Image (spheres, rainbow, N blue to C red):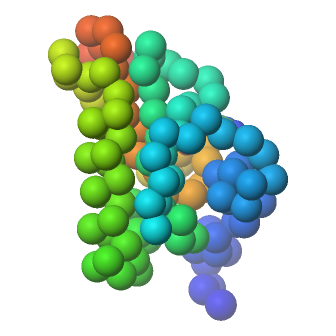
């Protein structure tokens, strides 16, 4: 058991519920180790999320503990998702991590946003 409770995966998070099919999601692509679906509260005309099926809290946790097969499968799922979405004019990929990153759902995910010219990467300080 990790000493820091923040290092414990919280399996009540909304993406864990989607993976257990307790709540619905608009699935874009599914692979052995990853799932892509549309964000339920889109911040762009096209807003997809890609998550590993494994219980990783954020990018650092995923990179430190996922198997090579899981990591490769994750990025292949990102590729398949990009192929399925109409993002020929470009897109933005981002991953929020922890409190400073503004992460709301504590299951590692990346956002793929596009469908229009997006604003600056971050709000000006
Ligand atoms: P983050 O702030 O990076 O943790 O992003 C979490 C994302 O999950 C937000 O963009 C939410 O709109 C999205 N979200 C929350 N609940 C759901 C849900 N039930 N299905 C799909 N996306 C969701």
Viewer-closest of 24 and 119 = 24
Q: Which residue is depicted at the point 43% across and 21% down?
A: 46
Could you tell me if residue 72 is visible in this image? Answer: yes
Vertical position of residue 38 compared to residue 76: above or below: above
Residue 94 visible? The answer is no
Q: Residue at x 31, y 46 (%)?
A: 80
- Determine which quarter of the picture holds residue 123: top left
Q: Is residue 120 above or below residue 8?
A: above
Horizontally, residue 116 falls left or right of residue 33, namely left
Q: Residue furthest left?
A: 89
The C terminus sits in image quarter: top left
State the residue at coordinates (37%, 73%): 70
Q: In the picture provided, is 15 more to the left or to the right than 68? A: right
Looking at the rendering, in which quadrant would you find the N terminus? bottom right
Residue occupying the far bottom of the picture: 1
The x, y position of residue 10, in whole percent, is 70, 66
Q: How many marks?
A: 0
Vertical placement of 110 versus 62: above or below?
Answer: above
Vertically, is 77 above or below 1?
Answer: above
Locate residue 85: give its quadrant.
top left
> Left or right: 24 with respect to 63?
right
Q: Is residue 84 left or right of residue 48?
A: left
Going by the picture, which residue comes out furthest to the right?
22
Along the viewing direction, whichever of 33 and 101 lies nearer the viewer: 33
Quarter of image, ligand 1: top right
Residue at 41% x, 38% y: name it: 111
Question: Residue 78 location in percent, x, y?
Answer: 32, 48
């Amino acid at each position: 058991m990790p000493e820091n409770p923040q290092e414990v995966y919280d399996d009540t998070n909304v993406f864990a519920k989607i993976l257990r099919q307790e709540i619905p999601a608009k699935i874009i692509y599914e692979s052995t180790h990853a799932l892509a679906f549309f964000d339920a509260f889109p911040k762009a005309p096209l807003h997809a999320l890609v998550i590993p099926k494994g219980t990783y809290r954020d990018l650092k946790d995923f990179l430190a503990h996922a198997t090579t097969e899981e990591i490769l499968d994750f990025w292949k799922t990102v590729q398949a998702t990009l192929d399925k979405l109409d993002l020929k004019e470009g897109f933005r990929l981002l991953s929020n991590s922890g409190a400073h990153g503004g992460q709301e759902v504590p299951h590692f995910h990346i956002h793929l946003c596009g469908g229009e010219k997006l604003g600056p990467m971050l709000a000006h300080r």
